[in-house]
Image (cartoon, rainbow, N blue to C red):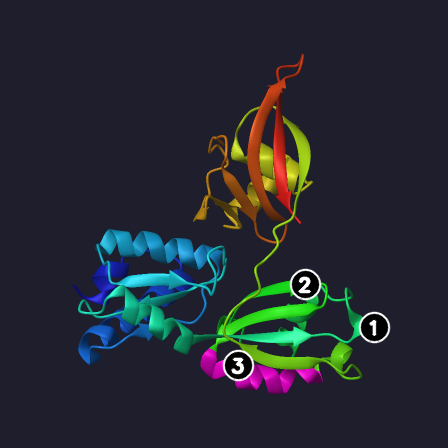
């Protein structure tokens, strides 16, 4: 089936471009009989691609971001004859990790936005960089392997790093990420998604609806654009720019018949 026919149901030009590039990779993998891979996709694009490939019934692919919980991922397309061992071997040849180690006096001063903002200001391509995992003593920046040398060259040019004796090195394995959560309680009039987004993002219902319409909300990794979507126990809600939340318990009903919900927020 031609690309135009496969993409006819997609209205947004950004979606069509993303899927067209994916189809090119699939075609190359078939004709060259080798592994091909995309740039890093954000959460919306990952959801878009997963649904598209299911619709195509295409199975010779893996989504990979360097670790199991990664939000930004590449799509690895491979020939039918390849088994799991061959694909795993190639993963280490596709993705690399640049570790930033801060001097003692700088530890704890840098957040995710400092690293990401600096990368963007340097004019480096965001789609070449995956998740940025920040620790007290520095960060692990996941990147396409061919991009890691450029990243190492440019990071010392970040304004905040110019006078710091930072250490940069490439590694093959991430440190085990320590997941920290804090428990919060919210009270919602119903289990509609917009009520949850309003409380979790600390904004009005109308603004929450806009956030949902802007395709910034994900439930269990899938983009959700219906404000009326009903939330269930153990759902994982991700709001781009606001955080990731797990619905842990429906803890009762108030006198005004609102539901008390216990939420675990990733911090």
Which residues make up the magenta segment? Answer: 145-157
**Closer-to-camera residue (8/240):** 240
Going by the picture, which residue comes out furthest to the right?
A: 105
Judge whether residue 206 is colored magenta: no
What is the secondary structure assignment of the residue under circle 2?
strand
In the rendered picture of this protein, how many numbered marks are placed on residues? Answer: 3
What is the secondary structure assignment of the residue under circle 1?
helix
User: Which label belongs to residue 135?
Assistant: 2
Residue 83 visible in rendering: yes
**Mark 1 or 2, nearer chain start:** 1
**Mark 2 or 3, nearer chain start:** 2
Measured in 3D between alpha carbons, the distance from the residue under mark 1 to the one under mark 2, in whole angstroms, is 14 Å
What is the secondary structure assignment of the residue under circle 3?
helix
Q: Which residue is mark 3?
A: 148
Measured in 3D between alpha carbons, the distance from the residue under mark 2 to the one under mark 3, in whole angstroms, is 19 Å
In this rendering, which labeled residue sits more in front, label 1 or label 3? Answer: 1
Residue drawn at (21%, 70%) of the image? 79
Judge whether residue 151 is colored magenta: yes
**Alpha-carbon neighbours of circle 1 within 10 Å: few (<14), some, or many (≥20)?**
few
Image check: 147 left or right of 181? left
User: Which label belongs to residue 105?
Assistant: 1
């Amino acid at each position: 089936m031609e690309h135009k026919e496969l993409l006819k149901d997609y209205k947004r030009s950004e979606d069509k471009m993303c899927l067209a590039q994916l189809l090119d990779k699939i075609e190359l993998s078939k004709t060259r009989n080798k592994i091909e891979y995309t740039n890093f996709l954000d959460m919306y694009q990952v959801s878009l691609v997963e649904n598209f490939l299911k619709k195509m019934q295409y199975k010779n692919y893996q989504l990979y971001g360097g670790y199991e919980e990664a939000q930004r991922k590449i799509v690895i397309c491979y020939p039918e004859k390849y088994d799991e061992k061959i694909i795993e071997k190639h993963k280490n040849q596709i993705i690399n990790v640049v570790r930033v180690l801060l001097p003692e006096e700088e530890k704890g001063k840098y957040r995710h936005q400092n690293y990401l903002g600096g990368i963007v200001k340097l004019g480096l391509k965001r789609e070449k960089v995956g998740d940025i995992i920040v620790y007290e003593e520095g960060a692990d920046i996941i990147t396409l392997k061919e991009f890691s040398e450029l990243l190492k060259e440019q990071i010392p040019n970040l304004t905040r790093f110019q006078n710091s004796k930072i250490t940069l090195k490439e590694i093959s394995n991430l440190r085990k990420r320590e997941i920290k959560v804090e428990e919060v309680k919210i009270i919602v009039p119903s289990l509609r998604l917009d009520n949850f987004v309003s409380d979790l993002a600390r904004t009005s219902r109308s603004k929450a609806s806009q956030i949902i319409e802007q395709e910034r909300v994900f439930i269990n990794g899938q983009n959700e654009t219906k404000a009326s979507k009903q939330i269930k126990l153990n759902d994982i809600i991700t709001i781009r720019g606001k955080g990731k939340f797990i619905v842990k318990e429906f803890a009762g009903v108030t006198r005004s018949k609102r539901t008390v919900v216990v939420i675990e927020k990733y911090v």
